[in-house]
Amino acid sequence: MNFKLSEEHEMIRKMVRDFAENEVAPTAAERDEEERFDREIFDKMAELGLTGIPWPEEYGGIGSDYLAYCIAVEELSRVCASTGVTLSAHTSLAGWPIFKFGSEEQKQKYLRPMAEGKKIGGYGLTEPGSGSDAGGMRTTARLEGDHYVLNGSKIFITNGGVADIYVVFALTDPSSKHKGTSAFIIESDFKGFSVGKKEKKLGIRSSPTTEIIFEDCIVPKENLLGEEGDGFKIAMMTLDGGRNGIAAQAVGIAQGALDAAVAYAKERHQFGKPIVANQGVSFKLADMATNVEASRLLTYQAAWLESNGLPYGKESAMSKLFAGDTAMKVTTEAVQVFGGYGYTKDYPVERFMRDAKITQIYEGTQEIQRLVISRMLTK
Ligand code: CAA
């Protein structure tokens, strides 16, 4: 067993950390405040090859693996969780199902420009009436000659409104729940597609979250992803990997908060000594660091399993469960270490705390992760 990262992984970490600290961190607070997505940051990620990390060069990627991708999401999230999830949704939720289930034509037409960062990807599963019960969707897709006609709406779409390509799930046979679900690749300029309400959120505020609407939306037959009826499995398998991307985001948020708390605890003096000299503070930091490290190991393990073609669904649910709870705990404790200052926008820890909360909710709540893990234990 070898826990040392390869030279390639270390190099990617260094490159992304430099980029994150120099190009992403300086505007993170301002973009959060203004709820502003910055396409230029995405374009710069594309220049560095970050928008196609795990995809082969023949599809516009850099031919690395899921561990490198997780390291990139972690390093971005260490300074800006919004930028982390932009890359995560783009790669694992939109890119992955096309890479795994797409035809050669679909991969060249859609995965390649996404991997090259010329197009941004999104994923549409959740609906107003179907969140945790993903199989309860209502959006329909009716085959009419050489195209499908989609009707319905999807909510809470990460990269909503800025994405050019969405992988979307709809019922081709509304009489059978899971087996009547199909997956489609939707271009944002398809007739009948529009972007609805943009959510005002507690955290990840510079990552746009919107509704997407289908009103007699015309989708060419060749944009069916996989076979009719494969949709629910494609959605679930996509989330199996996606969840580990969120775990990586959570690790990054927690590490960012821990780093800030350690630096502050050494520099802040009270009662004539740095506050880190009190075990009430230093033991807190020790617990935070231990949980961050355990989260990272779970996350890297799941990424390694996926990269090596081994089953990773259970491990990915575990990493998101543990890392999401860790991010919430560690960021809350970081605010505590900062005291009153931590509660202000003068320091980044309040943003980290607001950002952490979503990692316990999206890509399946922590309760759904427990359901997934327990079903795998007992199956
Ligand atoms: N891989 C392959 N197949 C799977 C699977 C998986 N991981 N999970 C389920 N399936 C298959 C089952 O084998 C079953 O197939 P058969 O009918 O052939 O037996 C079928 O799918 C139905 O499975 P279940 O009976 O287990 O389905 P369920 O209705 O009980 O739902 C669930 C299972 C795990 C609760 C699922 O609904 C779920 O994951 N819910 C949470 C949804 C979620 O995570 N949403 C996140 C939205 S995306 C998001 O958040 C994006 C973002 O903003 C960043």
Image (cartoon, rainbow, N blue to C red):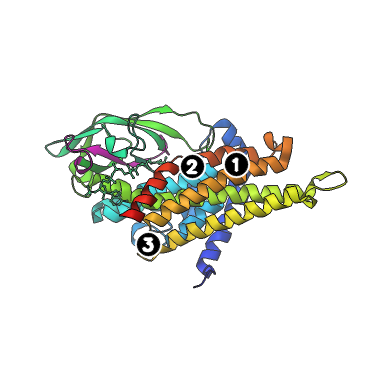
Q: Nearer the viewer, mark 3 or mark 1?
A: 1
Give the mark nearer the N terminus: 1 vs 2.
Answer: 1
Could you tell me which residue is drawn at 70 percent across and 36 percent down? 346
- Circles 3 and 1: CB distance less than 8 Å? no
Give the mark nearer the N terminus: 3 vs 2.
Answer: 3
Could you tell me which residue is drawn at 18 percent across and 34 percent down? 174
Q: Position of residue 327 (x, y in %)?
A: 56, 46
Gap in Å between the C-alphas at discs 1 and 2? 13 Å
Q: Position of residue 267 (x, y in %)?
A: 79, 48
Q: Amino acid at mark 1?
A: Phe
Q: Amino acid at mark 3?
A: Glu
Q: Quadrant of residue 125?
A: top left
Residue occupying the far right of the picture = 272
The circle on residue 310 is none
Asked whether residue 213 is drawn in magenta, I would say no
Gap in Å between the C-alphas at discs 3 and 1? 35 Å
Q: Nearer the viewer, mark 1 or mark 2?
A: 2
Range of magenta residues: 158-180
Q: Amino acid at mark 2?
A: Gln
The circle on residue 360 is 2
The residue at which mark 1 appears reads as 352
Asked whether residue 168 is drawn in magenta, I would say yes
Q: Is residue 113 visible?
A: no
